[in-house]
Image (cartoon, helix red, strand yellow):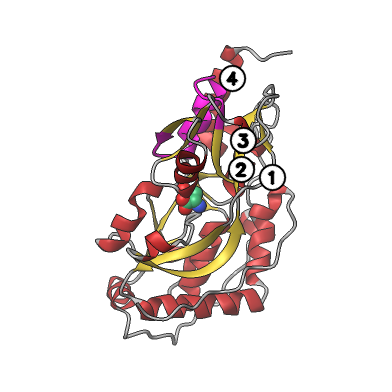
Amino acid sequence: MHRTRRTLAALVLLLAVGAAAACGKEGSPPVKGPQPDELPVYQVRTDFRLPGSATWSKARERGHLVVGAKEDQPYMGEKDPATGTYSGFDIEIAKMMSASLGFAPASVEFRTIASANRETALQNGQIDYYVGTYTINANRKKLVGFAGPYYMAGQSLLVRTDEDDIDGPQDLDGKRVCSAAGSTPYQRIEKDYPKADLVAYDTYSVCVDNLLTFQVDAVTTDDTILMGYAAKAPDELKVVGTPFSKEPYGIGVPHEDTALRFALDDALAAHEKNGDWRKAYDATLGLSGVPAPLPPAIDRYPAN
Ligand code: GLU
């Protein structure tokens, strides 16, 4: 039986108001978000100094870090509209890094930055570093630096559960496909599947609203992100096919700040070794049901 557009429109509203509204109310979708008491506590390195990093020195004067993130990607980076608190795997990575750089994780000031604005935000010093499903690639490396990778994602497709015709990117000819402006998934569809009818918005949550209201036929981006939306509306949305790209996630840093980049590479390695990475995964992205993989090898590339 097909769901009516009105039911779906109501769901759009629910998704838009997020976890706050969904919490404990009857008839709301079953959302199992990260539980604060299950998140690891990261040891703050109070003796840490990085005078060779302009970014670190500025943060030190300020007294806390300013970190760019996403706010509408369940499991990865999500902001609770009621409390303003951010949660998810990316948020945990950002907090681990903060602890290693000598700043209390609770003091991190998160700023939401959309996919298309990440490089500019790092270039003009709006943020100290960025953790938000940010794929490392050669083009971006000309503009910013990347610590990591700390996770390997892959591009996938999200469709309505009543969709039978779309199983992979080869089925997208003539279909309305939505992705975020400035993202690698958008660029891949544009280049490799030019017969798809591609539209872009600033965020994936707007794409999902458009999918639920029949404005588009599919949403494409990383599996990590799409699994979160599918989990929020399992009766309406499903992830189909197998991932068709490799998206190594990095921590974006200002291009010239190699000292900060290397310090973050060291910090990632340390948190992978001491079990924090794994615990953080289990308490966030692991809620999607996918068991923790091994983290990818860190690519400590030389100074540019
Ligand atoms: N990882 C991809 C990218 O960096 C898609 C996710 C995103 O837009 O943040 O473009």
Task: State yes or no: residue 208 in magenta.
Answer: yes
> Which mark is first along the chain, 4 or 1?
4
Kind of residue sitting beneath label 1: Thr
Query: Can see residue 239?
Result: yes
> Which mark is first along the chain, 2 or 3?
2
Residue closest to the eye, 164 or 120: 164
Label 4 sits on a secondary structure element that is helix
Q: Which residue is mark 2?
A: 156
Q: Which residue is mark 1?
A: 242
Q: Quadrant of residue 47?
A: bottom left
Give me the C-alpha separation between circle 1 and circle 2: 7 Å
Q: Quadrant of the C terminus?
A: bottom left
230 displayed left or right of 215: right
The image position of residue 294, as x and y in percent, is: 69, 67
Label 2 sits on a secondary structure element that is strand
Give me the C-alpha separation between circle 3 and circle 4: 27 Å
> Which mark is first along the chain, 2 or 1?
2
301 in relation to 186, above or below: below
The answer to the question of whether label 1 and label 4 lie on touching residues, with beta carbons closer than 8 A, is: no
Q: Which residue is mark 4?
A: 8
Mark 3 closeness class: few <14, some 14–19, many ≥20 residues within 10 Å: few
- Say which of marks 2 and 4 sits in front: 2
Kind of residue sitting beneath label 4: Leu
- Say which of marks 3 and 2 sits in front: 3
Label 1 sits on a secondary structure element that is loop
The image position of residue 35, as x and y in percent, is: 64, 52
